Image (cartoon, grey):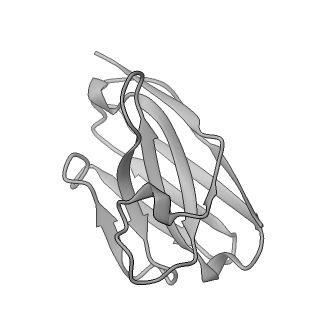
Amino acid sequence: QVQLVESGGGLVQAGDSLRLSCAASGRTFSNYFMGWFRQAPGKEREFVAAVSRGGDSTYYDDSVKGRFTISRDNAKSTVYLQMNSLKPEDTAVYSCAARSKAGVPVEISSNYDYWGQGTQVTVSS
């Protein structure tokens, strides 16, 4: 089992920045490919970003490319999502997820084995 706990969400204005953290415990963190997803009210959960086990490869949805940066610190068992130039449409509950499978699409939520409870990000205009 892997337990994931997100933090860092909040209420900000458009153009501001936030950094989300996701702390993992349980099994060896570096064995897991990590992702961030978000879900806005009335919408389906959508992929935001993902990072490979060693942190050398990153993946982004087009809607956040150039504004968000995913990173990980395996020594601290933590994955981060730095969000800059936030927009009202970024408002959602952000959840981190871990998966052990290799060679599967990063943007498919069902490929992930473990999920955090989520943290709310609200961007006002």
Q: Which of 16 and 49 is in front in this view?
A: 49
Image quadrant containing the N terminus: bottom right
Image quadrant containing the C terminus: top left
Above or below: residue 1 compared with residue 3 = below
Q: Which of 120 and 10 is in front in this view?
A: 120
Above or below: residue 103 compared with residue 42 = below
Q: Residue, x 59% and y 51% (percent of image)?
A: 21
Q: Does residue 85 appear left or right of residue 34 in this picture?
A: left
Q: Where is residue 50 in the image (x, y as percent from the top left)?
A: 41, 64
Q: Residue, x 55% and y 53% (percent of image)?
A: 96
Q: Position of residue 22 (x, y in %)?
A: 62, 54
Above or below: residue 17 compared with residue 13 = below
Q: Where is residue 25 in the image (x, y as percent from the top left)?
A: 77, 65
Q: Where is residue 34 in the image (x, y as percent from the top left)?
A: 51, 67
Q: Residue, x 64% and y 49% (percent of image)?
A: 116
Q: Which of 109 and 63 is in front in this view?
A: 109
Q: Does residue 85 appear left or right of residue 41 in this picture?
A: left
